[in-house]
Image (cartoon, rainbow, N blue to C red):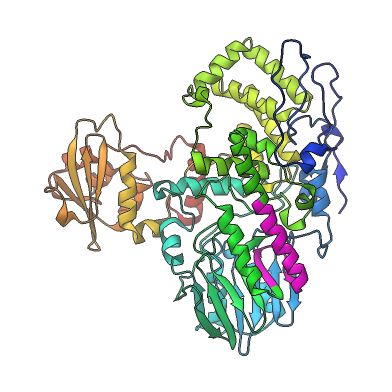
Amino acid sequence: MTGKRDECCDPPRATNVIARRNVLAGSATVAAASVVAAPDPATAQQQTAIAHTFPSPYMNAARTRVVTIAKGAMVSEETAAYWNLPVDSPQRASYDADIVVNVAPGVWTFGTESIVNCHAVAGQDGVIVYDTGDNLKDGEKFYGMLRRATNAPIRAIIYSHEHYVNGAKYFVDEEARRGNTDIKIVGHPNTNESVARTGGLSAAHPEVSTVLYARSVEQFNFYLPEEGPDSRFKNTIVPQAAGFVPVNTPIQDKQELTIAGIRLVFYTGGVGTDTENQTLVWMPDRKIVMNNVIWGMYPNIYSARGGRYRDPGGWIASVEIIKQLKPDILLSTHSTSLAGADQIMQRLQDYQDGLAFVRDQSLKGILLGQGPDELRYSVQMPERLKNSPILVQNYGEVSLMAPRIFNAIFGQFDRNAANLHKLHPTEEAERMIVAMGGAEAVRTKARQAHEDGDYLWAGQLADYLVKTDNSAANRQLKAEALRQMAYRTLSTNTRSWLLSQARELEGKVSIVKSVPAQPAAVETNLADYVNYYRVRVSAERSKDTDMLMTLAFEDGRSFGLHVRRSVVDFVQDVTKARRAADVTVRMKPETWTLVFNNVADPAALIDKGDIGITTGDAARAKAFFALFDAVYDWVNDPALVALGTMLQATTHSRP
């Protein structure tokens, strides 16, 4: 596939505004050094032109070529060069199209344009499968590939971690049609709980896991079209009906099992990457490792969607576990499979070095007094590591990783006292616009920055305008800057964030800010979802209220919420509450799902009898529920309106 140049993206070069540096040519300092020293402060005698001292792919980019690849997607030449690599190129570390790889006799890898691989190893009387995909569509595709490779029955499905479990139901159902109903579902002992409580996406505070899920959707191309310049082409996850099959064979660290005649050793302790619930598998008799440690790109020490801190040291230690096993075959959830001890050891060493370099140079920058915004520019990968196929930055960007290390240590304060307290973003935008001569002057500067290829600066200026005047013209100005940055990034995560929001600014999509809770999750984990409800209390409306409500469910479970003057306590055991309930309501678990997702008004449910009153009265119960704010607006939020319409069309009901 040959990249087609887009001539419209090569505008005339401005010559009288900004002095330029050719970022693509690079500099010896940036290429070889890890921490770039800050320049001397500007003086009055300095030239008025602004030099691009701190290279960025999003600045000085007017002449950066963009080309089209599969489905018309507009990308940088660097992205196209990687995309066009032969499938068996040693420079390629991930699969981008449907492929069945016979890694060794009886060992297969199934790859697609999705983010996850599936692996199968044949034993005496069947096969062992490692990971099943992110959804049922993945499951269907992977199962079809498996059946083209072998007709042997599945004896076990092993989950690497809780992210890629939702294709399993397709595997299990298809095997049942073949008469095979005895399948071990093997995984970390925390897998079932993690999936049940948060869908496998755990936030530091589970009350906002629905926001984490919404951010994940935005990060993985959901809002991008199938064709055209903005189209998705790699690392796509499209949420679909869940297909999780619970673990029926939980394993412990160093536990051994023999399945299909294959001896397996499981590692769960000390394996820390993007989740803490990892299952690394060692087949000592075949010298095979199956893992979610080695990705086919630089690992996301920080994922822009959010989540817990991913300590590079823990990741390095996880790689060391594999190195000590000395495998001959390496099967990984996110990277191309390898056979050959020397090749594998080189990949493992490069991966450790890439992690160690970014960690250590970030810490060095901190010792030199740099904050997170300086670190994103100063920590630059040396050529040796930058050119390693396993460390390509086409998933996340190193410029996002170093600030996360700083924040994990120090939090949001960068030690600059001027940043300890900040203006509200809207007020800051208003004052910045006034300081720059008014809205029209800022528009002119933004347009000039865009013409000069300084898209990052153009986007920042346009953002000030949108915050103060959300007009179609201002939104379009910002959208155009975001889109040009998206076309020039190597990172598919970054591309998705930029294009999703550009398309929302243009009214082409509506982005969900918090995904409604899945009914099965709410009804299975009622205690959690009653507890999560407490954060929605209105501080103002409840400031003089002291009221305890017991929520009794028809399946026998009961919990309490105690509003105490703008604070709410969750009562796990109502028999141990501080005092008797002021009002007790009774309902089905599915009714609480309607309340939690703001699909139905509690007052209306009380009037209909769907929420019954056991003690107290209806007026008191309505007053209690009125103390809480809705977080899902199914009438005025266009993203939820669209979601509701889709759900009604497919299930005849909202979530």
For residue 504, say whether it is visible. Answer: no
Q: Is 569 one of the magenta-colored residues?
A: no
Residue at x 60%, y 54% (from the top left corner): 238
Asked if residue 610 lies left or right of residue 9, the reply is left
Looking at the image, residue 313 lies above or below residue 8: below
Looking at the image, residue 109 lies above or below residue 178: above
Q: Magenta region: which residues?
A: 330-356
31 or 199: which is nearer to us? 31
Q: Position of residue 418 (x, y in %)?
A: 52, 22
Residue at x 48%, y 69% (from the top left corner): 188
User: Given the current orientation, which residue lies at the most extreme front position?
Assistant: 367
285 or 623: which is nearer to us? 285
Rendering quarter of residue 108: bottom right
Q: Position of residue 400 (x, y in %)?
A: 63, 42
Residue at x 19%, y 34% (from the top left corner): 545
Q: Position of residue 472 (x, y in %)?
A: 62, 24
Q: Position of residue 462 (x, y in %)?
A: 64, 24
308 or 345: which is nearer to us? 345
Residue at x 26%, y 38% (from the top left corner): 567
